[in-house]
Image (cartoon, rainbow, N blue to C red):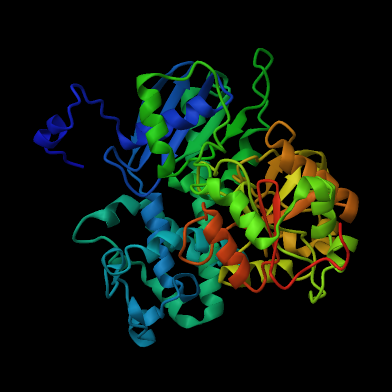
Amino acid sequence: MHFDPRFLHSLGIEKWHFVDHHEAHALSAFHSSPFRSALILSYDSAGNDGHFNVYVGSFDKVERIAQLDYSLGHAYEQLATLLPEVTGLPLEEFFVCDMENLNVSDKLIASKVLYFEKYPFASLSWAGKLMGYAAVAAPREDLRDSVRFFIEASNAWIGVETYAKKYPPALVKAACESVESQRELAATIQSEFEVFVHARVDALLQHIGHQQVEGIVLTGGCALNVLANQRIYDAFTKITLGEMAPGPLGFYVPPIPNDSGLSLGALWSVAPPRVRQPLQYLGFPLWDQELVIRHARQRGAQRLSRLGGIEYLAELLAGGDVWRRQRNHSADKPIVAVVRGRQEFGPRALGHRSLLAVPDGDMKERMNRLKARQWYRPVAPMIAEEALNQVFGRDVRSPFMTMAPSVKPEIQKSFPSLVHLDGTARHQSVSRFDEPWIHALLLAVGRQTGLAALINTSFNTKGKPIVNTVKESLRMLDELPDLDFLVVEDWLFRKRRYSEKAAD
């Protein structure tokens, strides 16, 4: 990015401090991690200092040791153009499916359009959708070489003349064959992405020596790929480092791995923090919080603490007596929006601007319908740390929804809405130190349902940002058919058609 020096001077600031894109990612990630030393990988689509940078952090210092020629974010996003169920656009928008010519083609096949010019904002969501869509089918072995070629040559595709234009013929042919073939292609893309990242992290650790760092830190937009994160976690946190080493490597992805963390990294480039502090709830408070009491009085809202507090809310979510007493309700258990405290800092809703429900029945489908999302999209469970072994058979901490371990078969059967199509769950683990109110709610839900877990997705609708006003929260409560209740701080708002048969 270029700045006009005259504009900078006009702001009256005598000295400017500039920080490179990936350096800011690395600083925000390392200084929020629990490690005194770490291998740091910052990788995404683009940056003024490359796309795939490697650093070593030690105490208050972060030093770049490598800059590799890959743009995995662009490659992943570009491959999504082959998948209509991901883009929401017909394949013909991007490619001519002339199967006769595709069967004999030995040259790279050009796309009809530059998607980043025609769909600059829509394409921002494709990577996340592709990751969820990849669970629909199994990888195809005959496509792996072509996907690997595209990923490994990813930096070659980002020039002005070649960006998003050329694809291996095997991939275009697979996309043109059938919907099932497209789904297998998606699974292959995700699988090869994981293999690629795993191999690079392994090589980097071999290069610096496992004994030289306490942990691995991933950041940049690609660190939102929870399946790749899980693969790295599973592969490297079990390494035995030798007699003189402290134990297996730690693993960390910050709550703000995408560009929302750049400002913090820039700040810490000037003055690194002396004490590590939690970051996940450093967002804005409600912008119109002074109106909460007025809206509560107008709508007849009740103090949750006077109704019974967390125990009341848990019974409501679980479909207990307090829910059955509501008039004119469906037989389904309710979905409750929660707006409490400061907004989450980062791309994940972590219980402060969330839609919550128990993870049974068709609740996942109801959540996706409420959000106007595709059928294959997962919803994320929040799980009390005491229940992690019950769900996964192991204690996988993931307070920022950065992991996706496999769920035990018996939990998949009993709580189907908690699990994605591939048997994994992108969970938020919650301890009393992470978020005491949510942790207590989960334990109370566990006493009702047998599992201290709720499914959670961000409180917003399609194409809209996460809510941060009481007015917009109430509008959604009134207009969204599947949304039943709203908690704003200590106030419980009911959908207008609900009322108690008797006074509480």
Towards the viewer: 237 or 285: 285
The quadrant of the image that shows the N terminus is top left
User: Which residue is depicted at the point 65% across and 47% down?
Assistant: 351
Nearer to me, 15 or 298? 298
Q: Looking at the picture, how far across and down is residue 178, in whole percent?
A: 51, 82
Observer able to see residue 131: no
Q: Name the residue at 44% across, 47% down.
A: 221
| Quadrant assignment, res 25 | top left
Q: The C terminus appears in which quarter of the rendering?
A: bottom right
Q: Where 231 sits versus 458, above or below?
A: above
Question: How many numbered discs, if any?
Answer: 0
Q: Is 258 located above or below residue 107 in the figure? A: above
Is 156 situated above or below 496?
above
Q: Compared to 21, does 134 lie above or below? A: below
Q: Residue furthest left?
A: 6
Q: Nearer the viewer, residue 29 or 210?
A: 29
From the top left corner, tell me how far across and down residue 376 is, in percent.
60, 69
Is residue 236 rendered to the left or right of residue 83?
right
Q: Quadrant of residue 230?
A: top right
Q: Position of residue 18 (x, y in %)?
A: 26, 29
